[in-house]
Amino acid sequence: MNLNLKSLYMVLLLIFFVFLPMVFFIFTQIPQRSILKDTISIITILAFFVVLLQFFLSNLNIGLKSIFQSSKIIKIHKILGYTAIPILLFHPFLIVVPRFFEVGPRPLDSFIKMITTFDSLAIILGIIGWCLILLLGLTSILKDKLKMSYKAWKIFHGSLALVFIIFASWHSIETGKHMNLSMSILVILISLAASILLFKSYFTTNKNKG
Amino acid sequence: MAISDISGCIGCETCVKVCPTDVIRMNRKSNKAEIKYVEDCQICHLCRLYCPVDAITITSEKSIPVIVSWG
């Protein structure tokens, strides 16, 4: 029974965080671009969905804790986090990587042009999101040095992750790259579910403590 | 088709400036570039090459003949 539940949970996570994003990506990718460009896009999209998945693969998820060991959940959470965060941090640089293999402006010129187009709301949101994920990664690495109580850490880390998700989702929808209606709805629904899970966890904890 | 899609535009206007046949114009409401006169596209790829975020997709097919020089 437990094994079935585990399998079911894993299948559901794979459907919502890997299969559906890839299906929607393929639908927005006609005609296809180069293999390098598509690979960069797929890696970035998957990294973003992994960060969304982190809310559901954490101790916030009481349902998950009844199926998997807490230590195992934390281990997977850390592995996925430390894999996805560097990808998202390098995401602005990855965009200009194909420039190394094409004629036209230099990669550095394209990069500077991109990050200095402050007329664009998508760029402003992207820069804020980039700073937030940098903070999220750094505070996770330096967690022990921050000397926070578990409760304070849980609130800080969860809130920071939520703020990041809001800005990142808004940035991706505003940019519109690989974002058809289905993908946007999926991102919004997962972000909403993550927010509800986070607030429910905080509320339940406070209620139990009180 | 020639220039077929602009997806992920950040509104830097580079493509508008480099297009030799004014195919692309800025949509001032959304602050993004849009394909306005697709029939004038000569498939020169300048917009795609100069776009800093690789937002432009170009197909090789064209519904009207490409303008070439005499002789």
Image (cartoon, coloured by chain):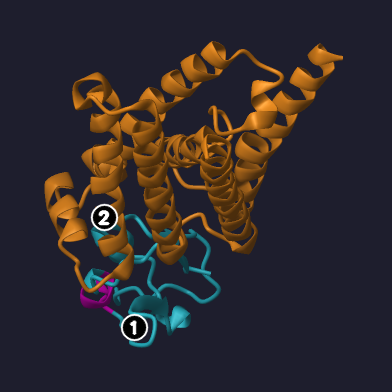
Q: Is residue A140 above or below residue B67?
A: above
* Quarter residue A83 falls in: top left
Label 2 sits on a secondary structure element that is helix
Q: Is residue B60 above or below residue A133?
A: below
- As drawn, the chain in orange is A
Given residues A36 and A22, the one toward you in this image is A22
The circle drawn on residue A1 is none
Q: Position of residue A95 (x, y in %)?
A: 31, 45
* Quarter residue B58 falls in: bottom left
- Give the residue at x 61% y 35%: A18
* Residue A31 visible in rendering: no
Label 1 sits on a secondary structure element that is strand
User: In the rendered structure, which amino acid carries the disc numbered 1?
Assistant: Arg
* Quarter residue A172 falls in: bottom left
Q: Which residues are magenta?
A: B15-20
User: In the rendered structure, which amino acid carries the disc numbered 2?
Assistant: Ile
The hue used for chain B is cyan
Q: Position of residue A69 (x, y in %)?
A: 61, 13
Q: Is residue A183 left or right of residue A112?
A: right
Q: Is residue B12 left or right of residue A6?
A: left
Q: Position of residue A158 (x, y in %)?
A: 42, 40
* Residue A12 visible in rendering: yes
Q: Is residue B59 left or right of residue B33?
A: right
Residue that numbered label 2 is attached to:
A128
Q: Residues within 10 Å of mark 1 (few under 14, many from 20)?
A: some
Is residue B18 in the magenta section? yes
